[in-house]
Image (spheres, rainbow, N blue to C red):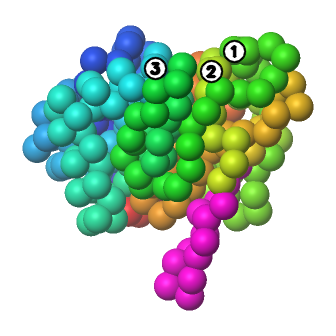
Amino acid sequence: MAQPSVVVLDYGSGNLRSAVRAVERAGASVELTGDLDAAMAADGLLVPGVGAFEACMRGLRAIRGERIIGRRLAGGRPVLGICVGMQILFEHGVEHGVDTEGCGEWPGVVERLQAPVVPHMGWNTVEVPVGSSLFAGVAQERFYFVHSYGVRRWELVTNDRTTAPLVTWASHGGDRFVAAVENGPLAATQFHPEKSGDAGAQLLRNWVRSLKAA
């Protein structure tokens, strides 16, 4: 059986080679590109991100990345966001008094963590909801975080036609924030699975395997 194809979206956000290698090891054929057609055609799209919310959104819009994400999701095509690549999926990011519009796929504001020590850097446990497929086999493991901002409050109203996302939480210095979300074809992690050892590798394998069934 052919390997699932994954595009790691290149929009100028940091060193992407570690993400490429990690997804390759998870069993996918990976291309690093900002090409719209390639990103649309792949079985899975991985949206990385490091640095400031505003800079990432500027880079994403420069290649029409928000349209790529929206079009894939409209067709039920899988997308995985990592770190700031998760944050930009929310409605807004507020950094240093600057409010930047995100992709708006989920409600919520990315804001500075209210903890005694920021950034939150290092290994941490997560609170995984029942029914998670992304965390299958690793719900009790630790993952590697590097961030100063996160989604600290999020309430999603659903109706009979809407399935509530599975939201994974974590805490740092007494402050709770969203650590991951699974929402149909759209999933994301605040932590870096590619830097999270065996647990992160298993999480990426879980995602890559899901592409075969998508």
In terms of depth relative to the viewer, which is nearer, 106 or 168? 106
Label 2 Cα crowd, 10 Å radius (few <14 / some 14-19 / many 20+)? some
Upstream in sequence: badge 3 or badge 2: 3
Say which quadrant the C terminus sits in.
bottom left
Upstream in sequence: badge 1 or badge 3: 3
Where's residue 178, x and y in %?
A: 67, 43
The three-letter code of the residue at mark 1 reads Pro
Upstream in sequence: badge 2 or badge 1: 1
From the viewer's perspective, tell me whether residue 38 is left or right of residue 66.
left
Mark 1 and mark 3: Cα distance apart in space: 13 Å
In terms of depth relative to the viewer, which is nearer, 86 or 129? 86
Q: Secondary structure at mark 3?
A: loop
Q: Secondary structure at mark 2?
A: strand
What residue appears at the point 54 percent right and 19 percent down from the top-left corner?
96
The region drawn magenta spans 155-168
In terms of depth relative to the viewer, which is nearer, 142 or 107? 107
> In the image, is residue 183 above or below residue 123?
below
- Label annotation for residue 147: 2
> In the image, is residue 6 above or below residue 55?
below
The three-letter code of the residue at mark 2 reads His
Where's residue 112, x and y in %?
A: 65, 27
- Label annotation for residue 52: 3
Where's residue 171, x and y in %?
A: 81, 34
The three-letter code of the residue at mark 3 reads Ala
Q: Are marks 2 and 1 in contact (CB under 8 Å)?
A: yes
Examine the residues drawn in magenta and state their main secondary structure. Answer: loop
Residue wearing tag 1:
119
